[in-house]
Image (cartoon, rainbow, N blue to C red):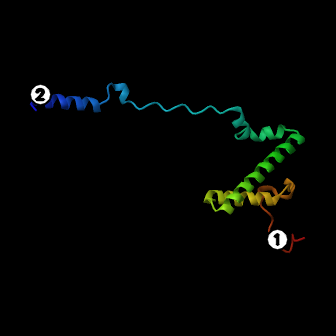
Amino acid sequence: MNKRTLALLATLIGLSLAPLSAEDAKPAAPAAPPVPTAEKVDKKGKGAREDWDKLTEAEKAEKLKERKAKMETRIKDLKAKKAAGTLNDKETQQLERLEKQAARGDRPPGDRPAGGKRPKKNETNEK
């Protein structure tokens, strides 16, 4: 091969590796974050507590029943995975948490003192 052919090959290889224009060299702009839908805003977020307060007692009871059924279904699925031996660490923790919640049952909120702490037992407040 002569010098002219080598120079031509080197130029072609250099052009194929380099971007064709300055626009190609810029990284693509990141996609815009998804806009939250009404369903997601209702389930989680700042307005969740206000939405709960606006519900009637019948609606609250229905939502609690739905949550309880969903929790029982998830517990059943996790127990089946545990029996099959395919439960991972994250799912083990979730199963423990859900079982504790289920053990509490339908305890009314008044059974728990404000702040979630129970008073210490001693001679003065023991009943």
Image position, residue 67 (x, y; %): 79, 47
Identified by mark 1, the residue type is Lys
Question: How far across and how far down the image is residue 54, in percent?
Answer: 83, 37
Q: Is residue 93 above or below residue 27?
A: below
| Element under disc 2 | helix
Task: Name the image quarter holding residue 11.
Answer: top left
Please say if the residues under marks 1 and 2 sit with CB atoms less than 8 Å apart: no
How packed mark 2 is, by other alpha carbons closer than 10 Å (few <14, some 14-19, many 20 or more), is: few
Task: Give the residue at x 79% y 57%.
Answer: 102
Name the foreground residue: 123 vs 77: 77
Write down the quadrant of residue 24 in the picture: top left
**Residue to which mark 2 is pinned:** 4
Q: In the figure, is residue 26 to the left or right of 84?
A: left
Q: In this view, does 54 lie above or below 21?
A: below
Q: How many labels does the image show?
A: 2
User: Label 1: which residue?
Assistant: 121
Q: Position of residue 122 (x, y in %)?
A: 83, 73
